[in-house]
Image (cartoon, rainbow, N blue to C red):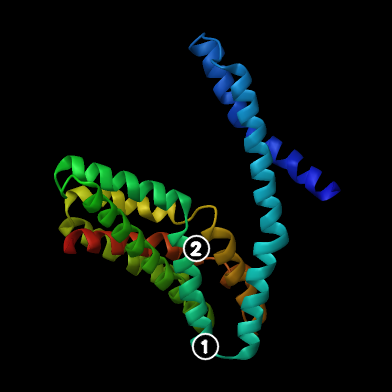
Amino acid sequence: MKAFLQSMLSSTKDLLPIVVVIGFFQLFVLQQPLPNLFEIIIGLLMVITGLTFFVFGLEKALFPLGESMANAFARKGSVFWLLMFAFFLGFGTTIAEPALIAVAAKAGDIAATAGAIANNPESIEQYSLGLRISVALSVGLAIVLGVLRILKGWPIQRVIIIGYILVVIMTYFAPKEIIGIAYDSGGVTTSTITVPLVTALGVGLASAIKGRNPMLDGFGLIAFASLLPMIFVMAYGMIY
């Protein structure tokens, strides 16, 4: 109970700057009272409570689970199953990512309005689902690439530089309508569900392999999870 209360206090401190900024601009710049003050207070309490449960759950379940599974696969010594686990972990967490679901749905609506696809629910849903699957596949492959980097000891900067050179090249050939969505897709994949598990996997794997430094080798998987979706979504736009 004490740990939970400390986590709630920490969540309150994290949200306090946002509340102060919004309140300052609302009261002193716009010089207007806060609308529906009671509902705003209730909403803030819900946000604090939800964030506390989320962070507390990460610390007690997802981080230890990811690290323990990475350790188990490293001890088992099966590269094939480790890479399979990495792929499906990236794919599964991304396809369920709330931020990606929201962005894909909005992208479908905009594409239909712009005339890029037929303006009917079936086409919009198909477009949004295809976008989500493309991003999820890219993140799965990104985690596989990141795991291979840890196993082989590849310098992360070389892989990242090559990837962004490819992104720049594809930007010239991809349809204009898909470029913004592609770049945003790199951000929405690194959100509430994907980041904790992927980070735990990298750190746990680097800790379990002799000669690897968790600080130097364990982090960096999220960079791949941000990079590959841009490439895959632009490719999806070219093909679609």
Picture residue at 56% right of the left edge, 15% below the top: 34
- The answer to whether residue 122 of the structure is visible from this angle is yes
Mark 1 and mark 2 lie on one chain; the one further toward the N terminus is 1
Quarter of the image for residue 48 reads top right
Quick check: 105 left or right of 39?
A: left
The residue indicated by pointer 2 is 93
Q: Compared to 172, does 5 lie above or below?
A: above
Q: Residues within 10 Å of mark 1 (few under 14, many from 20)?
A: some
Q: Compared to 78, does 113 lie above or below?
A: above
The kind of residue tagged 2 is Thr
Placement of the C terminus among the 4 image quadrants: bottom left
- The answer to whether residue 158 of the structure is visible from this angle is no
Q: Where is residue 83 in the image (x, y as percent from the top left)?
A: 48, 81
The residue indicated by pointer 1 is 79
Q: Tell us which disc is closer to us: 1 or 2.
A: 2
The kind of residue tagged 1 is Val
Q: Compared to 176, does 129 lie above or below?
A: below
Picture residue at 62% right of the left edge, 90% below the top: 76
Viewer-closest of 20 and 120:
120
Q: Compared to 86, does 189 lie above or below?
A: above
Quick check: 65 left or right of 81?
A: right
Residue most extreme to the top: 31
Viewer-closest of 123 and 3:
123
